[in-house]
Structure formats: C-alpha cells, structure tokens
C-alpha cells in the first residue's frame, strides 16, 4: 500500500515593506525642513537672550535642531492631536504663563494638528512683547500637494495645508504683526536640499512647497492722554471768592 504524504506545502514568504508613518519623516520633506532651519539663525540673532519654544511636526524631526545657542529652548512635537516632548499637553492649552517665550518656532506643527488656528492663538499668548514667532506651513498652491496626496495612499495622514492669507489673518486677530510671507523650498519634491536655479525665480516663488511668516508681538506702550480743557463753570468753582465759609475762615 502506498503511503500518503500529508505534509503541507511550505508557506510562501511575505515581504513586508515598512517605512515612516509620517510624511515629514520622508527624505523629500527632510530636505525642506533642513532648508527652513537654515533660515532660523538670522531671526534668532535679532532677539536678546531668553526662553524659546520649538514645535515640530513629528518625533522624527527632533534630530533636526536649529542654532539657538543663546536661548534656553523647550522642544515639543505633534503626536496626533496632542503635543509631546519636554512636556505633554493639548495644542489649545499650552502649560505656560502669558509672555513666557522671547522666540517661538513652529515648523509645520499647524499642518499636522487638527486645529492649527487654536495653536496660533496659544503661541500668540505665550510670546513675549517684542518677541518673534516663525511659522512654517505647507503651501496649498504648490505642485507638492499632489505628491503629498500620492504618498498618503500608504495610510499616512494628509497634512492640512492652510492658505497663507488665512494664517496671517489669524495672527493679526491675535494682535501679531504678520508681514508678507517668504517662500521656501522647491517647486517639486527632491531629495537634495538645494533650491537653486529655476526654483529661485521670483515668478515661481509662490509655487514653492512652503512659506514662512516671521510675525512679531508689539510691545505695549503708554499712550499720553490729551489734557482736558476746563469749562467756564469749572474754572469758577475754584475761584477764591467762591470758596466755602470754612475755607474763608481759615484763610
């Protein structure tokens, strides 16, 4: 009798490809982040020594640190709908007192948090008068946006690119002076941090993949009041011959 072989066929090996779970950890975004941080020292140099707050888009970006040598910096990053790092807190309830930081850097944290507007409100609150807020955001008019949606098909969350005008209006509503933006990066993804050549063209600048707003918080100043002119009956009230009997008696 022939012996039957009931051995199961070998299970085929499955190749599982893993990668970053956040778009801001991809090499193309890494090059953008490095170019943005290269612009920070020129703004830091204009501020006196003090405290600084650095917000980044994901935990992987903590390896990228700007040159803020004369600041004592607190570093936090977005993690879904909260902020983690040196402290853990909600984006709309930062655990610091008003006017706590002389310098604030928000590098695409508003692009990944559910409510970037509330984050702007809080950053304006903790920014000291005379301080600077550097806000980096993705440009929704850039061809990068199509590439970002293509990459997000792997299951990564799509950043919320907010138009620069809406961001500036929000800042102005928080009593921040928000000048015209500066555009950063390239018009199309690349793994090199260089933005030379055609990407530096003034005509194509609004199509670059990110924008920078260097907002400032104005110092409160004392406003001198106009002297109030005395009316005729008020002048008469202080004339000597109209003083009360007790004042005449004591004269």
Image (cartoon, rainbow, N blue to C red):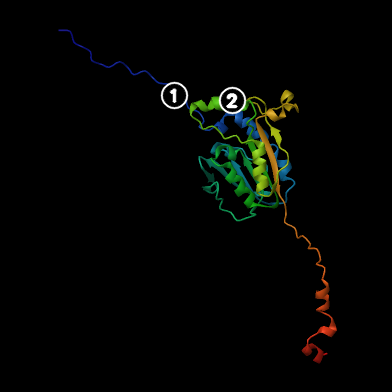
Where does the N terminus fall, quadrant-wise? top left
* Nearer to the camera, 249 or 242: 242
List x then y, in percent, for residue 141. Answer: 65, 29
Mark-to-mark CA distance, 1 and 2: 26 Å
List x then y, in percent, for residue 127. Answer: 65, 51
List x then y, in percent, for residue 4. Answer: 20, 11
**Secondary structure at numbered mark 1:** loop
Where does the C terminus fall, quadrant-wise? bottom right
**What residue is disc 2 on?**
146
Most extreme residue toward the left is 1
List x then y, in percent, for residue 54. Answer: 62, 44
Say left or right for 9 vs 48.
left
Residue density around tag 1, few if under 14, some if 14–19, many if 20 or more, within 10 Å: few
- Residue at 61 percent of width and 48 percent of height: 121
* Nearer to the camera, 193 or 102: 102
- Residue at 62 percent of width and 27 percent of height: 144
**Secondary structure at numbered mark 2:** helix
**What residue is disc 1 on?**
16
* Nearer to the camera, 236 or 182: 236
């Amino acid at each position: 009798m022939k012996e039957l072989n009931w051995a199961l066929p070998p299970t085929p090996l499955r190749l599982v490809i893993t990668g970053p779970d956040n778009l801001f950890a991809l090499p193309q975004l890494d090059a953008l982040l490095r170019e943005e941080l290269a612009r920070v020292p020129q703004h830091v140099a204009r501020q006196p020594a003090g405290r600084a707050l650095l917000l980044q888009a994901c935990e992987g970006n903590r390896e990228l640190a700007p040159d803020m040598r004369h600041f004592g910096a607190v570093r936090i990053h977005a993690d879904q709908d909260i902020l983690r790092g040196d402290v853990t807190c909600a984006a709309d309830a930062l655990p610091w007192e008003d006017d706590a930081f002389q310098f604030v850097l928000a590098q695409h944290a508003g692009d990944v948090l559910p409510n970037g507007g509330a984050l702007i409100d809080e950053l304006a609150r903790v920014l000291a008068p005379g301080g600077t807020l550097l806000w980096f955001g993705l440009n929704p008019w850039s061809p990068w946006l199509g590439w970002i949606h293509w990459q997000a098909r792997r299951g990564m969350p799509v950043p919320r690119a907010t138009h620069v005008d809406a961001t500036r209006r929000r800042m102005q509503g928080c009593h921040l002076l928000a000048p015209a933006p500066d555009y950063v990066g390239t018009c199309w993804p690349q793994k090199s941090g260089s933005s030379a050549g055609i990407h530096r063209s003034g005509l194509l600048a609004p199509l670059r993949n990110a924008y920078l707003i260097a907002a400032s918080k104005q110092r409160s100043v004392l406003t001198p009041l106009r002297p109030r002119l005395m009316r005729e009956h008020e002048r008469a009230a202080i004339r000597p011959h109209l003083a009360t009997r007790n004042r005449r008696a004591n004269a």
